[in-house]
Every structure is written in structure tokens, then in C-alpha cells.
Image (spheres, grey):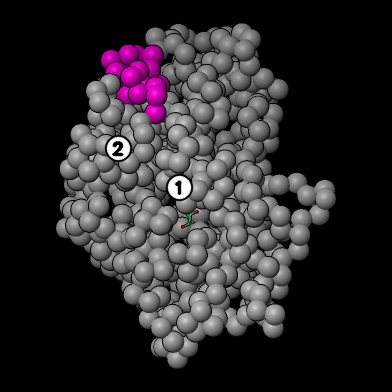
């Protein structure tokens, strides 16, 4: 402990996080939707069987579910679909009792159209809460104030006939944007954070954390130039513009400073991880704050955006690590509730290599529920989709990666006794917790070995990262080194056997052979698509 009573190394730097999408994790009451009681019933699996350290739980607040909980109508209550406020409080307690930390989503950018604040705000131009949202007059010809499009396509403005003004929405028309330039709104939202921090939550995943501050002059975005290279996945209509003016105005940083100050006043050392979809790295890194007074970590989506080959991964990893400010700490993720699953994107062999990569890099790993089993996206029959984005633009649907967690080979993969809200993926017969626990070669047992190795190794948790000269186009090799230990990770991304020269050590984990434990003397043989972790004591 230091003089101010804080441990020298913040807990979240050493943690492995696991994201739970509560609608799909475990259903305790048979209504087909996962719930908080369901999560509580699986805490032993998470803490002991799997061995993660912290949970990020996606929204369970009161919501009309236009965007499945990302449209909040009461930030300080639990939607009846998920339980009661007391269940959320018990979830925090039960998690803590097992040594698990818990972070919740903090929905900064918008609320539901049904939130009482918005209901009041839209009631008249003179309402005291009018300015809590963003209202603007139409242009002279009646059209919206700017050409901004919403992330989910269509204009980012909707005309409210009653008062004759447009309100802004970065996402669905049912998700009106909050006005963080109004001090009363800021205070009300900081109270929301305090409400959960008072109940012991260990921090927040901040939704759309760069979106809320837009150009005060409200200039139109320019169309993309012909040679424009998309920095990230296909976003449909949103990609038609360069987003110069509709996110990330510098005022956003002051807002994050205020949020951080609130969070830092709590003794549990809460962490803030922000959803920052920015691919200009210095700009991305600015969300740490010059004095580390903003987000503890902007989410690092860059590995997901990189091509999956040894050369591109090496460049992506090195570039990120160079851009994290000295003294800062990054995180790594390869999936979440908005992306296609990693085993779908990469295929089964590469998914195993991805597990080793994610759990052996310098930075806090975030796992997405079910990825530890090798779950793949389900194809949702036409007309049965649930995702509002997918309903607008079929191929952008996120439903496939949100299907029920696969617990066993029984009906509905053991997720529910009712009818699941989204279909269970077809591979649940073999890809599930119960079957995989029995099979030493399963993905789940690979994750368990990797998690245990990371827990036991200072080199993996806090050590430096150095790419090894044996890296080439097929093989990514790197070294993690702390004062006490050194570990080498060698990932063969090719379908050919290969050999790399490394210093002597002992194989701790192989992604293909659970029994591989030999001592390596200089030469390490790698099977096709094999990843090996070697420890040098
Ligand atoms: C974030 C969430 C996404 C949600 C959107 C609107 O991007 O991750 O799931 O749809 O915000 O709240």
C-alpha cells in the first residue's frame, strides 16, 4: 500500500475480464431471457471453473428494449426481465464473496425515448429539462439541422411534431442524445454513477464514450473521398461520411475528467473502460487524459481491426503499445456483443491461437461470454431477428453473436427451460460447458490452462513485451519479461510445421496438445496452427 492507502498496482491491470450479455447468459425463471439470478447461479463457474477475475455485465436497467437494454428508461432500477434492484445488489455481493470484481455499463450518450427526463424534455420548448437533450429548429426548408447520419443508418435527427423541433440521436430515434453541455444533466448523470458506486460496483464500461460531444457549430460532415480507406468494419450508410463533426469534440475530455473525479472518490478503486471507436491512435490515446485523469482505459479495438496474419498482428500490437502513454495500460479484446464471434471470423484453429494471444499480451484481456467454448454465430431465420440494426440493415445484424450461452447438450443448451429469445447455435451438442469440461483438448480446457498460466506468471501479467527476431510472415513470436521470469509465446499461424529458435525453457501450454510439457533446448517445433507458451525460469 502507498501513503494514500491505494495498492501500488491497480487491481484491473492484473485482471482478466469476462463480458456477460445478460439476456443470453442463464435464464433462472424459464421466460426465455437470461437474468441476474441466472448470472448469480453461474458465478462459481466463472470464478473457479474458468478462473476469470472480473465481470463486465451489459445493461439490465429498466428499458423498453428497443436496443435490448442500451436504451435506458431508469438508470437506477433493474428491468423486471432481469430481476429487481435487490438482485443486482446481491449479484455484486455474491461476486465479491468469490473474489470477482464487477463493472456495469454506464450509458452516457443517450437514454430511451421513454426515460422520464425525455418525456418532460419533449413536453414543451419551455420545459426545465428541454435542454437536457439536443433540440434544434429545422433548416428553412424544413430539413434536419445537419447531414449527420445515425450509426444504425438514417438521419441522426427526428422531427417532433408537437414542438416543431428536431431532436438528435446518434443511434435509434428511440435513443435521444443527452446534452452534456447542460450542467444539471451532468450532475444528474454523475448521480447515476454514484448510485451504483455506493452499492459497491467496481467501475463502469462507458458506452459510446466519444460520441456525446459534437461540433458546437454543427457543421455538415464531408462525404468520404474516393481514396478513403475504411478504418474499421463495414458500417453501412455511416461509412458514406468522414465523421469530422459528429463525435469527439475536444469538450468531451472535460466531461471525462468530471466523470473520473466522481469515480475516483470511491475507495474500491473503480475502473472506467470506455468504448472509443477511434482509429487515429494519438487521438484514441488522448482519452487517457494528459495526467491520466480521464478514462483508465479506452477500449482497444485495434486487434480486431487488424488482418489476421502474423505480420499484420505484429504491427498492430507494436503500434498500440507504442501509442499507450508511458505509465498507461491498455486492454485487448477480440469480441463483444456488437461483433461477429471470433471463432466465426477466424475459424476453429485460429480461434485457439487467438485465445493464447489474448491471454498472453501486455494489457488487460476482455473475453466475451461463450468464446471460451468456441461458440460461433448462429444464422437467424429471416424475420426472426431481434437486433434493431439488423432490422434496418440485414447484413449488419448483431444477433448471431448474442445467442444463448451453451451450458450443456440438453434442450436449449441448458440456457432456459422455456423458449430462448434467440435460437441456440447449431453446434451446442458438442460445444458446451459440460461436454468440454470432459475433454482435455476442448477450447474450454485450453482457456482454463491459459488463465491459470497467466495467473501464475508475473511475466505474463506485468512483464514487458518484445517481439522476438524469430517472427516472420507465418509465425509471431514475442517475449514477456518481468524481474523474476521470462516467457516466450510462439504462434504458428500457418498450416505448415515450422521451427523457431528460442532460448531454453519448458513448454507450459500448447494450443493443440494438452500433454505437451517438454523442455525445449533452443529449437521449438511448432505443429501447423500451434501456439506454444514457454517459460524460462
Ligand atoms: C454501443 C453498444 C451497442 C449499442 C450502442 C447504442 O455501441 O455497444 O450495443 O447498440 O452503443 O447504445
Of the pair 457 and 57, the residue shown nearer to us: 57
Of the pair 4 and 26, the residue shown nearer to us: 26
Give the structural element (helix, strand or loop) at label 1.
Answer: loop
**Disc 2 and disc 1: Cα gap in Å?**
15 Å
Dot placed on the residue nearer the N-terminal end, 2 or 1: 1
From the image, tell me which residue sits under label 2: 420
Asked if disc 2 and disc 1 are in contact, CB closer than 8 Å, the reply is: no
- Residue in the image at 31% along x and 50% along y: 102
Q: Is residue 476 left or right of residue 83?
A: right
Give the structural element (helix, strand or loop) at label 2.
Answer: loop
Residue 316's quadrant in the figure? Answer: top right
Q: Is residue 433 magenta?
A: yes
Q: Position of residue 456 (x, y in %)?
A: 36, 30
- Residue in the image at 36% along x and 38% along y: 422
- Neighbourhood count class around disc 2 (C-alpha, 10 Å): few under 14, some 14–19, many 20 upward: many
| Quadrant in which the N terminus appears | bottom left
Magenta span of residues: 425-443
Q: Position of residue 217 (x, y in %)?
A: 67, 78
Amino acid at each position: 500500500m502507498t501513503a494514500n492507502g491505494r495498492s501500488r498496482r491497480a487491481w484491473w491491470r492484473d485482471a482478466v475480464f469476462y463480458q456477460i450479455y445478460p439476456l443470453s447468459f442463464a435464464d433462472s425463471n424459464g421466460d426465455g431471457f437470461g437474468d441476474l439470478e441466472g448470472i448469480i447461479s453461474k458465478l462459481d463457474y466463472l470464478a473457479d471453473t474458468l478462473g476469470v477475475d472480473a465481470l463486465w455485465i451489459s445493461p439490465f436497467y429498466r428499458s423498453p428494449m428497443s436496443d435490448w437494454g442500451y436504451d435506458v428508461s431508469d438508470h437506477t432500477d433493474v428491468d423486471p426481465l432481469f430481476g429487481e434492484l435487490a438482485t443486482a445488489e446481491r449479484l455484486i455481493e455474491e461476486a465479491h464473496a468469490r473474489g470477482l470484481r464487477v463493472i456495469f455499463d454506464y450509458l452516457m450518450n443517450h437514454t430511451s425515448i421513454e426515460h422520464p427526463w425525455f418525456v418532460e424534455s419533449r413536453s414543451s420548448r419551455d420545459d426545465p429539462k428541454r435542454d437536457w437533450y439536443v433540440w434544434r429548429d429545422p433548416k428553412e426548408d424544413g430539413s434536419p439541422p445537419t447531414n449527420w447520419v445515425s450509426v444504425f443508418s438514417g438521419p441522426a435527427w427526428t422531427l417532433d411534431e408537437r414542438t416543431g423541433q428536431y431532436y438528435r440521436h446518434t443511434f435509434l430515434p428511440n435513443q435521444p442524445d443527452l446534452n452534456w453541455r447542460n450542467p444539471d444533466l451532468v450532475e444528474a448523470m454523475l448521480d447515476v454513477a454514484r448510485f451504483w458506486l455506493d452499492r459497491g460496483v467496481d467501475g463502469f464500461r462507458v458506452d459510446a464514450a466519444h460520441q456525446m460531444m459534437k461540433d458546437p457549430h454543427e457543421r455538415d460532415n464531408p462525404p468520404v473521398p474516393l481514396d478513403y480507406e475504411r478504418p474499421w468494419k463495414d458500417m453501412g450508410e455511416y461509412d458514406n461520411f468522414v465523421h469530422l463533426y459528429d463525435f469527439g469534440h475536444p469538450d468531451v475530455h472535460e466531461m471525462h475528467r468530471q466523470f473520473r473525479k466522481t469515480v475516483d472518490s470511491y475507495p474500491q478503486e473503480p475502473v472506467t473502460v470506455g468504448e472509443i471507436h477511434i482509429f487515429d491512435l494519438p487521438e484514441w490515446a488522448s482519452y487517457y487524459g494528459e495526467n491520466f485523469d480521464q478514462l483508465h482505459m479506452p477500449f482497444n479495438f485495434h486487434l480486431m481491426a487488424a488482418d489476421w496474419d502474423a505480420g499484420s498482428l505484429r504491427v498492430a500490437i507494436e503500434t498500440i503499445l507504442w501509442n499507450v502513454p508511458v505509465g498507461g495500460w491498455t486492454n485487448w479484446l477480440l469480441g463483444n456483443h456488437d461483433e461477429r464471434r471470433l471463432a466465426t471470423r477466424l475459424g476453429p484453429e485460429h480461434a485457439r491461437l487467438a485465445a493464447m494471444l489474448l491471454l498472453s499480451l501486455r494489457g488487460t484481456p476482455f473475453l466475451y461470454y461463450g468464446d471460451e467454448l468456441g461458440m460461433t454465430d448462429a444464422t437467424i431465420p429471416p424475420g426472426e431477428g431481434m437486433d434493431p440494426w439488423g432490422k434496418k440493415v440485414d447484413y449488419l445484424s448483431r444477433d448471431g453473436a448474442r445467442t444463448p450461452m451453451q451450458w450443456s447438450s440438453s434442450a436449449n443448451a441448458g440456457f432456459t427451460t422455456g423458449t430462448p429469445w434467440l435460437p441456440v447455435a447449431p453446434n451446442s451438442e458438442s460445444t458446451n460447458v459440460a461436454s468440454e469440461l470432459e475433454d482435455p483438448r476442448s477450447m474450454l480446457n485450453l482457456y482454463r490452462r491459459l488463465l491459470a498460466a497467466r495467473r501464475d506468471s508475473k511475466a505474463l501479467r506485468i512483464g514487458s513485451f518484445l517481439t522476438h527476431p524469430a517472427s516472420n510472415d507465418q509465425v509471431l513470436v514475442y517475449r514477456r519479461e518481468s524481474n523474476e521470469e521470462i516467457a516466450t509465446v510462439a504462434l504458428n499461424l500457418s498450416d505448415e510445421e515450422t521451427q523457431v529458435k528460442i532460448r531454453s525453457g519448458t513448454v507450459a501450454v500448447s494450443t493443440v496438445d494438452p500433454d505437451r510439457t517438454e523442455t525445449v533446448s533452443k529449437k521449438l517445433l511448432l505443429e501447423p496452427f500451434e501456439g506454444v507458451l514457454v517459460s524460462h525460469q
